[in-house]
Image (cartoon, rainbow, N blue to C red):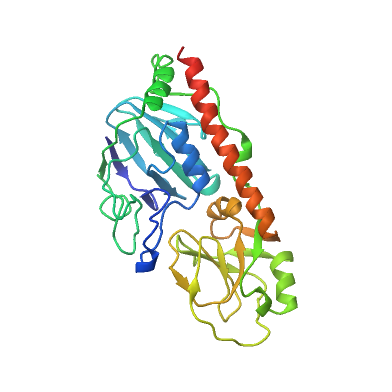
Amino acid sequence: MIKITKPGLLTSVQDLGRYGFQKYGVITSGVMDTTAHRIANSLVGNAENEATLELTLLGPDMEFREDTLISICGGNLSPSIDGKPVKLWRSVLVSAGSKLKFGGCKTGCRAYLAVAGGFDVPEVMNSKSTYLRAGIGGHNGKALQNDDELSLGKPSELSEKIAKVLAAQFGENKFVEMQWTISSDFIASSASKPLVRVIKGRQYDWFTIESQMKLFTEHFEVTSQSDRMGYRLKGPELALEEKQEMLSEAVSFGTIQVPSEGNPIVLLADRQTTGGYPKIGQIATVDLSIMAQLKPGDKVQFVEVSHEVAQQLYLDREKKLHQLKQGIALKIRQETK
């Protein structure tokens, strides 16, 4: 069990999302950075869809009531256990009674804390994800609060083997980290103005030539009017050739809509099921993790990519993630012989 002693800015239970219910108006929710979430789960021997804690900008303080295998991936929110820094992107075994805290945000915006066995919270419509506006899923449908206690699920066989490898190195330490970590290829860019690949949207041709050029040549800044539903961007005005009315259409994670004032909105995990603004672009799936790690004040530049190239990039990433999971299992088998 884990007890929350300080909730942080916004800490919630999330998995890969609530799919199959958008036709009823139920949004998908789920983690913002799917890559960090999936890798965090792999490092503790969980299935990729197991729930993690999504921590935003200012992480929580928590106390472990039992020995727990964890991993922290995504943004660097300066984690420490009993005052000693903890490394990201690796397996970590924490002893009972230890206290995990987070400090300043060094890179990114969101971190993901996975625990072996996942968090034992009820599924709502086949998902443990928290949808804050509707108050469903996660831990009582809310962001975590002071004194909340989270029960843990049953660890997998792989989880137990990872913990066994680390337990042999415990000694007098309150926690022990795996010596090896993952390739930097999986870590989202922390550049000051990252490049994000974008496919032309369904209404791209409705915009002026000048606006089309600006989309792929100018920088856009994430404003403070941004949350898990969407990022409002500030930059050059994107204007239509002529005013047009459109029916609401389906939208997805990474859809770039442009309201009448000309400042784009990037739809994210808690997006609505349909949208009525013209869609100038769609962020390639492989770069959604880059967007998820941006915070207000950060700037981004969009780069055009074809649908075919975006698909191939996605397939390449999925192949690498599959190889990573196999590599972790193989490494653990070798170390437990």
Q: Is residue 61 found left or right of 176 in the rendered image? A: left
Quadrant where the N terminus sits is top left
Viewer-proximal residue among 64 and 150: 150
Q: Visible in this render: residue 25? A: no
Viewer-proximal residue among 213 and 202: 202
Q: Residue at x 51, y 63 (%)?
A: 252
Q: Visible in this render: residue 97? A: yes
Q: Is residue 90 above or below residue 193?
A: above
Q: Residue at x 63, y 43 (%)?
A: 316
Residue 174 locus on image (x, y percent): 38, 23
Q: Residue at x 72, y 65 (%)?
A: 216
Q: Is residue 232 above or below residue 54?
A: below
Q: Toward which corner of the image does residue 283 lie, by quadrant?
A: bottom right
Instruction: Count the labels in the image.
Output: 0
Point out the residue furthest to the top here: 337
Q: Is residue 218 found left or right of 262 in the rendered image? A: right
Residue 2 locus on image (x, y percent): 29, 37
Viewer-proximal residue among 190 and 114: 114
Residue 18 locus on image (x, y percent): 38, 55
Q: Is residue 21 above or below residue 72?
A: below
Q: Residue at x 51, y 32 (%)?
A: 325
Viewer-proximal residue among 268 and 80: 268
Q: Is residue 115 found left or right of 213 in the rendered image? A: left
Residue 92 locus on image (x, y percent): 44, 28
